[in-house]
Amino acid sequence: MGSDYGEVTDIGLMETQIITPDDNLVTIPNNKIFTQNVACANAGMAEMMVVIDIYIDHDADITRAIEIFREAVTTSRYIYISDRCFYTILTENQLHSVRLRARAYVWDLRDEFECKAEISKRTKETFQREGIIPPRFYLPGELPVS
C-alpha cells in the first residue's frame, strides 16, 4: 500500500498493521485502504513469486551463466516448485550488461528476502569460480573497448 510493504498482522476497526521485511511495525489508517490501491502479491496463499536479477557482461558465457543460475534457483531450500508454482529464467540485453532474471515461488512469503540473498550469493560465488564476468560499467561519454 503506497510505499508500505509487508505482512498484515492485524486488521482493526480503525487501522491495519503490517510488519515490513525489516521487522518494522507500520500502522495504516483503514480510510487509506478504502481510498488507495492495495496489492496482494500472493492472493492469500503461503507461497509467493520472487524475482531475482543477476547481471553479467556481454562477453560472459551466457549459456553457462544460465545453467549456474538455474541450479542455484532449483536447489534453494526456499523455492517451491509444483505444477502451479514453477520457475523461469529470462535474459535481456541491456546497454552494458545482460540481465538474467529468475522468477520462482518461495514456500513462505516471509522468506522472500532471505531467498533472494541466498540465490544471489551462491550464483555470484559460482560465477566468480568459473570466470563468468560481471558487467563492466563505463563513465558517461566513455566508449567500451572491443
Image: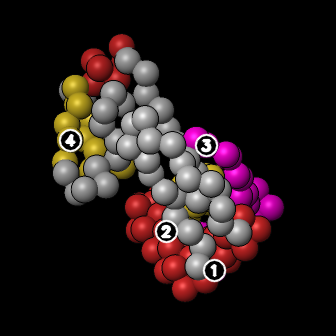
Q: Which numbered mark, 3 or 4, is in the foreground of this view?
A: 3
Q: Earlier in the sequence, mark 1 or mark 3?
A: 1
Cα distance between the residues tagged 1 and 3: 28 Å
Q: Which numbered mark, 2 or 4, is in the foreground of this view?
A: 2
Counting other residues with Cα less than 10 Å from the Cα at mark 3, is it few (<14), some (14-19), or many (20 or more)? Answer: few
Horizontally, is 51 left or right of 83 in the view? left
The structure residue drawn at horizontal position 23% and vertical position 57%, both measured from the top left corner, is 23
**Which residue has dot 2 on it?**
120
Under mark 2, the amino acid is: Ser
Cα distance between the residues tagged 2 and 3: 19 Å
**Which residue has dot 3 on it?**
94
Q: Earlier in the sequence, mark 2 or mark 1?
A: 1
Q: Which numbered mark, 2 or 3, is in the foreground of this view?
A: 3
User: Element at badge 1?
Assistant: loop
Query: Label for residue 26?
Result: 4
Q: Residue furthest top?
A: 35
User: Which x, y percent locates residue 15?
Assistant: 22, 31
Under mark 3, the amino acid is: Gln
Between 116 and 79, the one lying in front of the other is 116
Whether residue 15 is visible to the viewer of this picture, yes or no, is: yes
In the displayed structure, would residue 37 be above or below residue 83? Answer: above
User: What segment carries the magenta color?
Assistant: 74-95
Q: Quadrant of residue 43?
A: top right
Between 1 and 134, the one lying in front of the other is 134
Our reading of the magenta stretch's main secondary structure is loop
User: Which x, y percent locates residue 124?
Assistant: 50, 73
Cα distance between the residues tagged 2 and 4: 28 Å
The structure residue drawn at horizontal position 56% and vertical position 69%, both measured from the top left corner, is 133
Q: Which numbered mark, 2 or 1, is in the foreground of this view?
A: 2
